[in-house]
Image: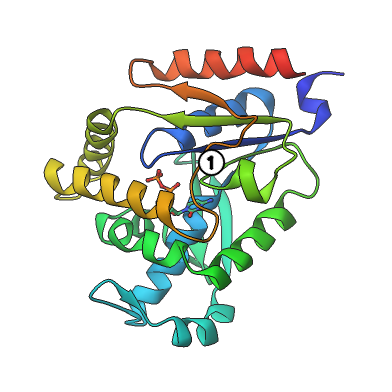
């Protein structure tokens, strides 16, 4: 039986902006698995909270959000023409908006809320029940799928990550400064690693990939090799 038929769960966790989604998408394509972007879910809830003015001075109105969260419906579609995965909030395409620095600046505040995480984790498990999934995030190998067959923990130097994200947003036409991006990356890492609910940490059985000096192709080859060892 080959890897595609085995329908495994592959968890890719790690620091902000280290290229988890790039390698997860490349791998999904290569082995014909479904790619699920758990970070996009937290970004959608953040956008929803921002639009409803529920975040002020780095404080979230959790009470109001708890009453409104059931109005949030998240879905994903692959856009053949643009060759990209796209995210929807209640049927509205929000893919570009959720990647903006404004959303990045608030997302870790939303992601540390227990009821938000519970709802997102339930959705992540529901989407994965058939297996054959590659999911990236912060708590996939530790909380969402502690029995995942392959767990990768990705990281890269802060400066490398900041430059990658800066280029990505610039290419999309967003006016951002490298200093602001670097601050955002560091701050998100700090909040994600130090929160009470499902903090970002390496699962004991995860394999570390530091891709500071690796190209896209090299990191994909590295993961494919790890897969062949596991399978
Ligand atoms: O792509 P990038 O590394 O910038 O971030 P992302 O994967 O889109 O995740 C955005 C934020 O969502 C993270 O900084 C975390 O605060 C949160 N997140 C989380 O708490 N748990 C996950 N499984 C995925 C994301």
Instruction: Determine the residue positioned at 41% across, 61% down.
Output: 94
Left or right position of 226 against 210? right
- In front here: 176 or 89? 176
Q: Is residue 162 visible?
A: yes
Q: Is residue 139 above or below residue 121?
A: above
- In front here: 48 or 83? 48
Quadrant location of the N terminus?
top right
Residue 18 percent across, percent down from the top left: 38, 34
Q: Is residue 36 above or below residue 125?
A: above
Instruction: Determine the residue positioned at 68% across, 34% down.
Output: 33
Instruction: Determine the residue positioned at 37% across, 82% down.
Output: 52
Please give the residue where the numbered disc 1 appears in the rendered image: 80
Left or right position of 67 against 125? left
- In front here: 108 or 68? 108
Q: Is residue 213 above or below residue 67?
A: above
Q: Secondary structure at mark 1?
A: loop
């Amino acid at each position: 039986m080959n890897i595609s038929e085995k329908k495994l769960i592959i968890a890719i966790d790690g620091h902000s902006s280290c290229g988890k989604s790039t390698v997860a998408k490349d791998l999904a394509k290569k082995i014909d698995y479904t790619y699920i972007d758990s970070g996009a879910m937290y970004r959608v809830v953040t956008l929803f909270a921002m639009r409803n003015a529920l975040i002020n001075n780095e404080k979230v109105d959790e009470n109001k959000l708890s009453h409104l969260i059931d109005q949030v419906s998240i879905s994903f579609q692959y856009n053949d023409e643009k060759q990209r995965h796209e995210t929807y909030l209640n049927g509205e395409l929000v893919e570009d908006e959720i990647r903006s620095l404004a959303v990045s600046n608030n997302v870790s505040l939303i992601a540390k809320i227990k009821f938000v995480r519970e709802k997102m984790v339930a959705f992540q498990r529901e989407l994965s029940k058939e297996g054959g999934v590659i999911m990236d995030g912060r708590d996939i190998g530790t909380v969402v799928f502690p029995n995942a067959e392959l767990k990768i923990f990705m990281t890269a130097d802060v400066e490398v990550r900041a430059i990658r994200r800066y280029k990505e947003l610039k290419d999309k036409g967003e006016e951002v400064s490298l200093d602001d991006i670097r601050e955002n990356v560091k701050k998100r890492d700090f909040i994600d690693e130090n929160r009470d609910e499902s903090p970002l940490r390496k699962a004991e059985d995860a394999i570390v990939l530091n891709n500071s000096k690796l190209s896209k192709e090299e990191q994909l080859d590295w993961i494919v090799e790890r897969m062949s060892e596991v399978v």
